[in-house]
Amino acid sequence: MLKLIVRYGSKILADADYSEDDIAAGAAADALALLVAALPAGECLRVSIARVDAGDARALPAAIEQGARADMAEAGLVLLRPWTPAGAPPGLHLEGFKPHRREISVRAVMSAPRLGFNDMWACAAEVLPALGIPLTKVGGAFWDQSVTLGLTDALADGAADYILTLDYDSVFNRAHVARLLELALVHPAVDAIAPLQASRHNDKPLFGVRGDVGTETEVARETVEVDLYQVAQAHFGLTLLKASKLRALPKPWLVGTPDAGGEWGPGKVDADIHFWRQWEAAGNNLALAPRVVIGHLELMVRWPDQGLAPIWQSAQAWERTRRAPPGTWTGIAA
């Protein structure tokens, strides 16, 4: 026999016994649905399932978690994930949030070069149709122009609530996109949401907490161990933009500007940074979703080391040095 406890904050809303077969078969769905219906939008409901006999140390079958997650989702909860109660008692502990809306309409947009990474297209082909998200692809030599044309097209019929921007060198799965959509449903006051993505040019992630380009700010780890973290700039690798805010944003949306000397050096402002400055100046906010982490494709050069095991060098490092990395096999005895 299992005990199911449902909490809202410090309050216990339900405490009932079920058999393992009942939980696995979704017997708690109706009770959870009633509790979720009375829950304020944006709030969290927590579910714990444990064996009635505290001395029974057997692990719960996987079907119990599957059934509990299905019940919570059917009841209308999103952002489902484990949580740890005080004292970390044994059992299954899941939490979920009530969205402000059950559905949103999303259009995806990307600028695509003539040649690109098929790995990214495999992601898009697998994920976007499954989530009912149509994709507008715009080609051309100029990224800023192509993205602007794509965004404008996605807004044209007025049907989209959000625009999802893609880059041709990002990799992601269905869970990444679904989690971004769930965050938007739970946090409607957030105007743009970007996942965490590593830069290909340095060892930093692609976000900035200030609008100044090239500045470094210390960010405590615990401040980004959250669902959303407000930032000043991010990327377009897999980023949700609220359509109403984008429609009202003054143009040009994306334009690069050289430095004071007309050079494209450290003082330049890239087109994407211009966008985020415009976004902030218009009174819009941007949040990083640090728990949604997507990949950044990069070409790599593989070399044999002195033991003939592989070592790796980025294509950018090869371009910069035209030399094999330290430790590469030389054929000369040490």
Image (cartoon, grey):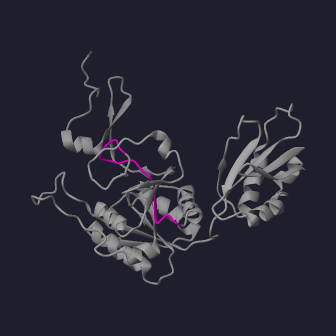
Residue at 88% across, 40% down = 52
Q: Residue furthest front?
A: 10
Q: Position of residue 173 (x, y in %)?
A: 53, 56
Locate the N terminus by quadrant. Answer: top right
Q: Position of residue 30 (x, y in %)?
A: 83, 63
Residue at 83%, 57% in the rendered image? 28
Q: Quadrant of residue 317?
A: top left
Position above or below: 142 against 54? below
Is residue 186 inside the magenta stretch?
no
- Left/right of residue 76 with respect to residue 154 in the rendered view: right
Q: Which residue is depicted at the point 15% across and 58% down? A: 259
Quarter where residue 156 is shown: bottom left
Q: Main secondary structure of the magenta part?
A: loop
Residue 139 visible in image: no
Query: Residue 38: x percent and y percent?
Result: 75, 65
Task: Tell which of 147 and 249 is nearer to you.
Answer: 249
Q: Please, is residue 103 above or below residue 268 in the view?
A: below
Q: Which quadrant does the C terminus fall into?
A: top left
| Left or right relative to 137: residue 178 | right
Please state the horizontal and vertical placement of residue 221, each as a whole percent of the image.
Answer: 46, 40
Between 210 and 152, the residue placed more toward the observer is 210
Q: Going 73% across and 48% down the picture, which residue do you hit?
A: 10
Region in magenta: 189-204
